[in-house]
Image (cartoon, rainbow, N blue to C red):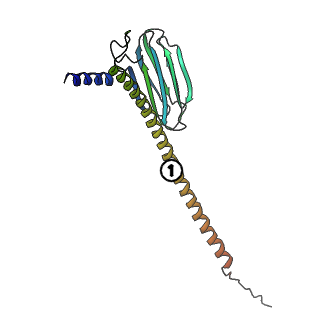
Amino acid sequence: MKMKMMTLGWVLLLLFACARASELTFELPDNAKQCFYEDIIIGTKCTLEFQVVTGGHYDVDCRLEDPDGTVLYKEMKKQYDSFTFTAARNGTFKFCFSNEFSTFTHKTVYFDFQVGDDPPLFPNENRVTALTQMESACVSIHEALKSVIDYQTHFRLREAQGRSRAEDLNTRVAFWSIGEAFILLVVSISQVVLLRSFFSDKKTTTTRVGS
């Protein structure tokens, strides 16, 4: 019973030991700009990762500023990117996504803002002595689960992007087919009218002139 309780405790630690992170998927309308804010302590390592899931050419403007307003990162019309930095001071950092260059296309944007490194799985993980077999197994499972979560996130984003592209292509094909059918109908009617004009009898009128 005691061993089961210990195992349950390690599993709970495994599930809840993670760094502070903000992960969000949101819709960015045309001619719009959306900003987010995060309080960061000096010396903290942070990573901003984003990707445009749907909309237009799958691009967006991204800008990251420190509390003083200094631009740390700025990219125009990027489909996806990742940027890692270390906070040089305490304060509120701001990162914005802009779709102001688009006049009619909405975008769906995903971002993951990670603040700090993962805390150790065990309070005494950095001790001099080696980890026990169970502790080593828990650490290995923890790292594998983090990799699985990252892969699942990227695969979901790719699946959503592929579905959006397929739906957009299907819509274009449908409109193109309707246009072709309309043109074919107009050409067929025109040909019928033209052929009838060739074989129709033309009535001639005769005028007699008296002598």
Neighbor class of circle 1 (other Cα within 10 Å; few <14, some 14-19, many 20+) is few
Residue 89: x %, y % from top left: 46, 8
Residue 56: x %, y % from top left: 53, 38
Evaluate whether residue 27 shows in this view: no
Tell me the quadrant of the picture where the C terminus can be found.
bottom right
Residue furthest out toward the bottom: 211
Asked whether, in this view, residue 101 is left or right of residue 117, the answer is right
Circle 1 sits on which residue? 170
Q: Is residue 84 above or below residue 177?
A: above
Asked whether, in this view, residue 200 is left or right of residue 140, the answer is right
Instruction: Tell me what residue is drawn at x 43 percent, y 22 percent.
Output: 113
Residue furthest out toward the left: 1
Does dot 1 land on a helix, a strand or a loop?
helix
Residue in front for this viewpoint, 72 or 42: 42
Q: Is residue 55 above or below residue 2?
A: below
Q: Is residue 30 above or below residue 35?
A: below
Instruction: Tell me what residue is drawn at x 46 percent, y 15 percent.
Output: 45
Asked whether, in this view, residue 211 is left or right of residue 68, the answer is right
Tell me the quadrant of the picture where the N terminus can be found.
top left
Instruction: Tell me what residue is drawn at x 34 percent, y 20 percent.
Output: 133
Residue in front for this viewpoint, 103 or 143: 143
Q: Amino acid at mark 1?
A: Asn
Tell how many labels.
1
Instruction: Tell me what residue is drawn at x 45 percent, y 16 percent.
Output: 93
Evaluate whether residue 143 shows in this view: yes
Report which quarter residue 181 is drawn in.
bottom right
